[in-house]
Structures are given as structure tokens and as C-alpha cells.
Image (cartoon, grey):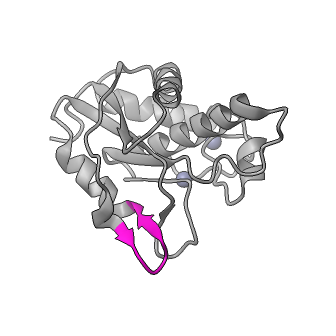
Amino acid sequence: MAGSGRIILISPVGDVDPAVCESVRAEIGRVFGYPTTMRPLLDDVSFAFDANRNQHHSTPILEKLDALAPADVLKILAVTRVDLFIPILTHVYGEAQLGGRASIVSLYRLGEDLSPAAGETAFLKRVKKEAVHELGHTFKLLHCKEKTCIMHYCRKISDVDRKSGELCRYCKILMGDEVKRLGGG
Ligand SMILES: [Zn+2]
Ligand SMILES: [Zn+2]
């Protein structure tokens, strides 16, 4: 049953740099306060490939991850290198089941417009922000008007760079309520 587990699973989908996944795992543990573990659940996402768009539809991938995850898993954050979309948008940095179990973040567009000086650190910062953002949706958090809040919706990479790596005070309270409802944290 969804929500019965205690662990947040970080799950690489396909070929993903383990150092990136580890960095995301540590950040998820810090922000959400749950035990985390890293394990692949799904390797082949060709079922979600749209040949016309040359992108993967994220929604069926989330459904598959939810179906594959063991019962002791409270939430799943998948990390992938493929470009993701939902039908109403040209692309997404990630998607999540609102109040559900599965979320995914794509690295595909998070390397855009990086200054050479900023390099890997700036890339990882973006990945961590978008990972926390998507996982936040599984804890019922909605998009936040506060531009610096990690739950602010980002259309462009400059929006991602501008927001902080933290929940605003308001979102933090909502998050705390949901963790309590789930029975701890
Ligand atoms: Zn969002
Ligand atoms: Zn907020």
C-alpha cells in the first residue's frame, strides 16, 4: 500500500552517473529527513518513447515505477538522462504524482547555459533543486508563488538558478503536516 513504507528510494533509470545519484540521495536525506536508499527499478523506458517528439512521456514512467517499487518504499525519486515531456508542454525538468509515490527528474536540460567557471557544482545544484521539487509534490506540495522557494515552478533554466535549495516557511509547514500525517519522519 502506498505510504506504508519508511524509505525514500533514489532510483537511476538507464545509464546515470552514480556520483550524481549519490549527491541527490544525500540532499533528499537532508531536506526530507527520511532514510534513503539507492537502487535501480527500471532500465528500459522505450514504452514511454514518443517518436514524433523524440522525447519520453514522463507520466507512464511514473506509473511503472510506482508499480515496481516494493511496499517498504514510501516515495520514489527516479533520475534519468532522457528528455521528458508531458503533452501540454514542450519539455519538463521532471514530473511527480501529486500526493502519490513516484517522481522523476531529468538531467537532459539541466546542463544548459552553464558558465565554464560554474561547472559541475552549478549543474549539481540544479539537479538537487529539481529533485527536491519533484519529490516535494509527492508530499502534496503545490507550486509556490515565492520565487526563491524550491517549490516555485521553473519554466527556464535561469528560474532554476534563481531559486534557493530550500522550502519557504509556508511550504515547510505544509511539508511538516504531511510528514506527521504519514506517521513520522
Ligand atoms: Zn512542479
Ligand atoms: Zn514555498
As for residue 56 lying within the magenta part, the answer is yes
Instruction: Say which quadrant the C terminus sits in.
Output: top left
The percent position of residue 20, horizontal first and vertical second, equals 53, 30
* 92 to the left or right of 96: right
Q: Does residue 118 sit above or below 31 in this rendering?
A: below
Q: Taking 120 as reference, is 8 left or right? A: left
139 versus 50 height, above or below:
above
* The magenta stretch spans residue 172: no
Regarding residue 168, the answer to whether it shows in the image is no
Q: Which region is colored magenta?
A: 49-58
Q: Would you say 45 lies left or right of 137 here?
A: left
Going 43% across and 48% down the picture, which residue do you hit?
104
Question: Percent from the top left, x then y, of residue 69?
Answer: 21, 40
Which residue is nearer to you in this view: 101 or 16? 16
Residue 14, compared with residue 82, is above or below; it is: above
- Total label count? 0
Q: x and y percent of residue 1 in the render? A: 14, 41
Picture quarter containing residue 173?
top right
Residue placed at 69% from the left, 31% from the top? 120
Residue sitting at x 26%, y 24%: 6
Residue 91 placement, left or right of 75: right
